[in-house]
Image: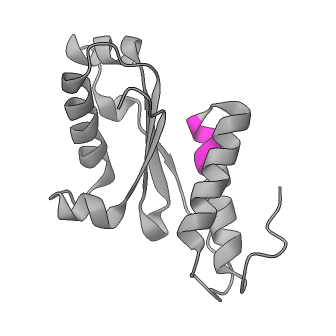
Amino acid sequence: AKLVDVVIFSKAYANLRGHSDPVSFLSSIVDASWQSETKMGEKHLIIAWGTEGAYGVTVNFEIMNQIQNKSRSISDFVVHQKAFAPKVVVDTLGAGDAFNAGLLADLYRNNDIGNGLKEACLVAGIKCGQCGFENIVN
């Protein structure tokens, strides 16, 4: 996946792969990705975790060296963003699409996983609190 910079996973996919928590899943993906590539550029790995929000990690050569040298673990680099729950859940159809759009737009602007997760969870929360997609901007 040398051409891929951002990968977004779902909780359902992680569960199907035998993971009941997001950090162990991201760790397994990082391990598998690193073993298959000798020169990995910066990658953003994201997993939406429903009402708990989302988790993500940015991985690059420097981080992988720290992990391989056992001076740090992948969990040291995982960022968590709590969900922004609306006062009343009106319509969840398209919440995942809204999450993805918010994440990608912010990563494009800022390339910061923490800000990207915050924007993604905020946009998804706004979407769940209304019917349709109108007025979901900035």
Q: Tell me the quadrant of the picture where the C terminus can be found.
A: bottom right
Quadrant hosting residue 109: top right
Quadrant hosting residue 3: top left
Query: What residue is at 33 percent from the left and 13 percent from the top?
Result: 39
Left or right of 84 on screen, residue 67:
left
- Whether 123 is drawn above or below 92: the answer is above
* Residue 42: % across, % down: 47, 23
* Residue 35: % across, % down: 18, 24
Residue at the outermost front position: 3
Query: What residue is at 74 percent from the left and 75 percent from the top?
Result: 133
Query: What residue is at 69 percent from the left and 46 percent from the top?
Result: 105
Quadrant hosting residue 41: top left
- Numbered label tally: 0
- Whether 113 is drawn above or below 88: the answer is above
> Would residue 133 be seen by someone viewing this image from the given angle?
yes
> Would residue 70 be seen by someone viewing this image from the given angle?
no
Highlighted range, magenta = 113-117
- Whether 75 is drawn above or below 71: the answer is below
Left or right of 62 on screen, residue 110:
right
* Residue 108: % across, % down: 68, 36
Query: What residue is at 85 percent from the left and 72 percent from the top?
Result: 135
Q: Tell me the quadrant of the picture where the N terminus can be found.
A: top left
